[in-house]
Image (tube, rainbow, N blue to C red):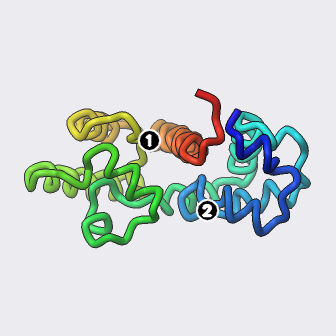
Amino acid sequence: MGSFLRWNPPSGMDRATFISVFGGLYEQSSWIAASVWDQGLSQSADHADGLLRWMKQVVEEAGSGPQWALLRAHPDLAGRVARAGGLTDASRDEQAGAGLDECSEAEFDAFQELNSRYTQKFAFPFIMAVKGSQRATILETFRRRVENEPDTEFGIAMDQVHCIARYRLEALGECED
């Protein structure tokens, strides 16, 4: 287990510290960490898997309105906001790690066209946990998923949001390898 959890167990954190540390696991949605803390932290939150399970449960129990807001809080992949430097630090690092900050003009144009089609069809941006992926794989996945039915894609996007949260917790050094 990461030394941070061993020496600074979440169950012993005050609300502000907990939200400061874990509020960014879900894109611009610190309400999830706040809700976990407000429910009364137990020692299950002191382990990465327990904390992530609890956060996922909060999202699942929040209902469709907050879930839609969570999906819509994500930026487009390789989008204009990224080029303008308007991403959260975590999103910027994730997209850069997948090389999305180095798109050729043709790749950028492909992402823009897919972003537009996807958002128009599903009413939220394409969400993919891009860690360990390359641009070509991301584009291939994007092209395939834009053809999905809305209910199917909503479920996939929610799963990807939870994967991103896990990767972000790992980046904090919280999860075992």
| Number of other residues with Cα within 10 Å of mark 1, as a class: few under 14, some 14 to 19, many 20 or more | many
Q: CA distance from mark 2 to mark 1?
A: 16 Å
Going by the image, does 127 lie left or right of 51? left
- Tell me which residue sits at (37%, 37%) in the image: 148
Q: Nearer the viewer, residue 117 or 138?
A: 138
Which amino acid type is marked by label 2?
Ser
Which residue is the site of mark 2?
29
Residue 27, position as x, y percentages in the image: 54, 58
**Sequence-wise first label, 2 or 1:** 2
Q: Secondary structure at mark 1?
A: loop
Which amino acid type is marked by label 1?
Ala
Q: Quadrant of the N terminus?
A: top right
Q: Quadrant of the C terminus?
A: top right
Q: Secondary structure at mark 2?
A: loop
Residue reaching furthest to the top: 177
Going by the image, does 126 lie left or right of 100? right
- Tell me which residue sits at (70%, 57%) in the image: 32
**Numbered mark located on residue 68 in the image:** none
Q: Nearer the viewer, residue 138 or 142?
A: 138
Going by the image, does 55 lie left or right of 157? right
Which residue is the site of mark 1?
129
Contact between labelled residues 1 and 2, with CB atoms less than 8 Å apart? no
Residue 90, position as x, y percentages in the image: 47, 56
